[in-house]
Amino acid sequence: MTRRPLLALLGIIYVGVIAAGFLTPYDPLVQNRDDAFATPTRVRFVDAQGVFHLRPFVYGSSHSPDTAYPVQFFVRGDRYRIAGVFASDLHLFGTPGPARVFLLGTDQYGRDVFSRLVHGGQISLLAGLLGAGLSLAAGVLLGTLAGFYGSWVDEAIMRVAELFLALPWLYLLLAVRMMLPLHMDPGQTVLLLIAVIALVGWARPARLVRGLVLHTKVREYVLAARSLGASDVQLMWRHVLPQLRGVTLTQAAVLVPQYTLAEVTLSFFGLGVAEPVPSWGNMLASLQRYHVLASYWWMFLPALALIPVFLLYYLLADRIHQQTAYSL
Amino acid sequence: MRFLARRLAHGLVVVFGVTVLSFVFAEAAPGSLIDELRLDSRVSPETLATLRDRYGVDRSLPEKYLYWVRSVARGELGFSVAYDGPVGPILWPRVRNTLLLTVPATLLAWLIAVPVGVWAASRKGGWGDRAAAAVTTALLSVPELLIGLCLLLLAVRTGWAPTGGMVSLDFAELDAWNKVRDVGWHFFMPVSALVLATAPVLVRHVRASLLDVLHAPFIQAARASGIPEHRILFRYALRAAANPLISLLGLSIAGLLSASLVVETIMSWPGLGPLLLDAVAARDLHLVVAAVVCSTLLLTAGSLMADGLLYLADPRIRAERP
């Protein structure tokens, strides 16, 4: 597989979680206390009499287990916002009346796991993406400055980077997490988590970029530009920065999954996004109780959802690395 | 020996820097356990003032740091507010338990990764190589969190292995032999999780660095002299490929410590990881600083060990040529 289909698949995943309100039937915060840990609803085509129906239907759960309710498409339901801007109440699918369609079951408060999974992806996936973007930007900036100017600038930046690299990353993440208050409101948490991730992650890209800049700044075309009177900013922007493309892209493909995992891990330990707002990490936190772990397989789904995302990024990193290595 | 001395000095400087860095993080942390006590109406302002004085909350950062360094010199490593005692005695058993887990896991992961990597490299492009690549890629995309949870599920459902902790409930009544067996049995799950989380990366690196060497002229010469293939692979090629792999040994310890934090917490292994998590949640600053510095110490010790091995394995480094 080349780069393009991988990027397209990743794009579909990200667009999907952004359009979570439309794709999922329920508000992720709405509780159905009568239906705690409901098994995934079977969507059926054949009824008890053995008659085939073209329109899929579900049986009502605890309220009316023998009545069939059709699954309808483009139904009105809970209100939601997409990207905080477009308000609507149109959902891709749903059922009328008291019946509920829980595609992936419910959690301990009877909240729809499918709705929470897709909504939770917004926080987990976007925190990883933005965190990696921010830490890469910081890393490229500091690495370029260190490599380009050398002497004490280089010394100062790289000595600090060494300290950040001397810590196992989860320990570093927890140390940085300590700077934030324990209880935060969810909107703030996401932004602060992204900042934490960026602070944890700048050192590795900075070191890689510095090495490449050291190598690039003595190339003939850079020296020629300098002799023509180009300023430092021009040299860095026009002549050095384009050389960093391969390293930056490969690093991005490596870092995004790692920082997605950072959010998941922190929230899993109760130090990230707090209930009731869903994130893949805090959804997994209920697995810390043995009876949930042993009895309800659908509670594993947020962790399973990470696998395809990681696999795509992993293959992408491989491809970018190969392509840029050949083009050098 | 100058090489090793230089590495040692560098490691010490880094560890010192990390203590300062983690103190800066701790200083920026809002709130402390004493602030929580303030909300409790049963605690009088005088008591609070005494506590603030005893824990040095109102001192400046350099003063706090000096105070901490003095306490490190006494072997106390600071004072834990949550445990109401010096950090040292709380920390050491936890470090021992983490080492008990990570050292066998490292050894086992390398014991698996080296033969598999060599085997895959010797059959480059064949079905075996492709199968190994598929398995390692698949395992790489599974987060250690999920590996840990799945193994725990297996333990809970089947009852083959203990579901957590380090010893059974009746540990104190067992005789010496059964104690060893009991702890060994509890090792099984966390060590397998760590090996599954670390070995795939190692396999890929062993394969890659071996492939770099296999095209070298001296390998062809060895082949032409009729030396058997397995001897070429393990005696000649692996030795020449050892240099980057030994560096990787030092680096792999960092990943292993992070994975170990997750696995220890999931499997309730009384190591450094759960201690740090509890300390962060309780705002027990000295304990956090000590645990973080400890992880750096382990990491630095690991890379120093790798440097030592490199010194033994690579004659160019012994010859001190730059």
Image: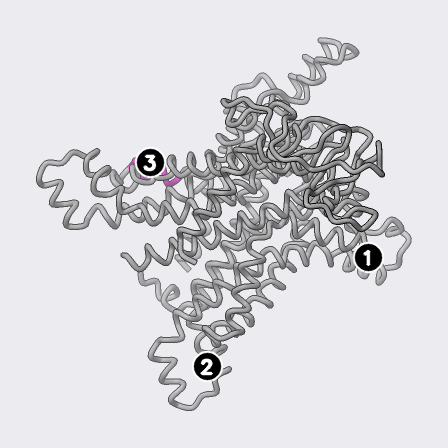
Query: How far apart are the alpha carbons under marks 2 and 3?
Result: 46 Å
The residue identified by callout 1 is: B158
Residue B42 counted in the magenta span:
no
Going by the numbered disc 3, the residue's amino acid type is Leu
Residue ID for mark 2: B232
- Which numbered dot is residue A63? none
Q: Position of residue B199 (x, y in %)?
A: 58, 61
Q: What stretch is highlighted in magenta?
A: A152-159
Q: Mark 3 points at which residue?
A: A141
Predominant SS of the magenta segment: helix
Residue drawn at 70 percent across, 54 percent down: B190
Residue drawn at the location 44% of the way across and 70% of the way down: B210
Q: In which quarter of the image is the C terminus of chain B?
A: bottom left
Figure quadrant of residue A87: top right
Under circle 2, the secondary element is helix
- Please tell me if label 1 and label 2 are on a single chain: yes
Q: Which residue lies furthest to the left in this view?
A: A228
- Front in this rendered view, residue B70 or B191: B191
**In terms of sequence position, does the residue under pointer 1 or pointer 2 come before the other?**
1
Chain for disc number 3: A
Picture colour scheme: one colour
Would you call the spot at circle 2 few (<14 residues within 10 Å), some (14-19), or many (20 or more)? some
Quarter holding the N terminus of chain B?
A: bottom left
The structure residue drawn at horizontal position 82% and vertical position 57%, both measured from the top left corner, is: B158
